[in-house]
Image (tube, grey):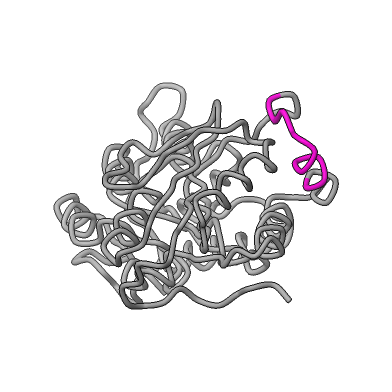
Amino acid sequence: MPNTSKAPQTSDSHSVLAILAGGDPLPTTIAQVAVAKGWGVHVVTFAGQPKPTSLPNVNSVKEFPLGQIGHILAHLKAHKVTHVALAGHLNKPSILSLKPDATGLKLLARAVIKHDDALLRSVTDFLQEEGFKLVTIQDLAPSLLAPKGLLTKAEPTADEVEDIALARSTLAVLGDLDIGQACIVHNGAIIGVEAVEGTDALITRCAALRMGPNGNGEQGGILVKRAKDMQTDLADLPTVGLETLNLLAKFNYRGLHIQSGRTLFLNQPETIAHANAHNLFVVSE
């Protein structure tokens, strides 16, 4: 049976965590929390992929080609890793860039022509079959999940509440098709859906669409971001934070709507203060 036990909530010097890391602040946050709990922490990054910018006090950082699964497993077992976390953004690789070893080819065969969520399940199932316990930021630091409610001084208007409902129903359909976790809604219309470029690029792209070719169009719009109903919570939960609100403020959006309990909300006090300073609303429900 797959090993799905949760991470211990107290200091445990015998637990050793490997973070399979992409870009964005989440791998750093997980590393900091695990180190504070007394865990050993080893970080694996991937050649040609985004990487964490800061990894203080971890035991090791080693880079591998993305497809070298057998070599990665050997590295984890050599360091007596007990738990594994998947965190951070990776760009979709080309087949040629994977450079799979024999174990990597087996995993690719299991995951062939699958969408993102099915691929993630293949990876998490494989790691559990190898004896590792999957650990998430929800296990290590549940306070980083978005709390429920209106989190800012500003709040959506009645029309914007209707826009949010439209965006949520749209994301529900797109989630069933395994397409993105976010969209931009404005004045009763969906003006953009997150694709492989990520949320930051979605915000930037939709700002240009909203303003028009002459740059004198409308301001406003709402970013709505939610986990797909079908996705595993072991990896790739929606993540927002200060950089998200910086972009929304920069491009004169009205606010952010996220899913409570299934969205990672990093740097919450600073992010909410920034939203208040720019009259942006943040709603979590």
The residue closer to the viewer here, 111 or 58, is 58
Quadrant that contains the C terminus: bottom left
Magenta segment, principal secondary structure?
helix
Spot occupied by residue 91 in the image (x, y as percentages of width and height)? 58, 35
Find residue 176 and report its image quarter: bottom right
The magenta span reads 97-107
Above or below — where is 3 with respect to 215?
Answer: below
Q: Left or right of 283: which side holds 73?
A: right
Seen at 50% across and 76% down, the residue is 6
Spot occupied by residue 19 in the image (x, y as percentages of width and height)? 47, 51
Q: Left or right of 166: which side holds 2?
A: right
Seen at 52% across and 47% down, the residue is 20
Spot occupied by residue 52 in the image (x, y as percentages of width and height)? 39, 39
Find residue 94 and report its image quarter: top right
Q: How many marks?
A: 0
Residue 101 in magenta stretch: yes
Quadrant that contains the N terminus: bottom right
Seen at 69% across and 60% down, the residue is 130
Above or below — where is 99 with respect to 206?
Answer: above
The residue closer to the viewer here, 41 or 170, is 41
Spot occupied by residue 147 in the image (x, y as percentages of width and height)? 33, 74
Residue 99 in magenta stretch: yes
The residue closer to the viewer here, 266 or 217, is 266
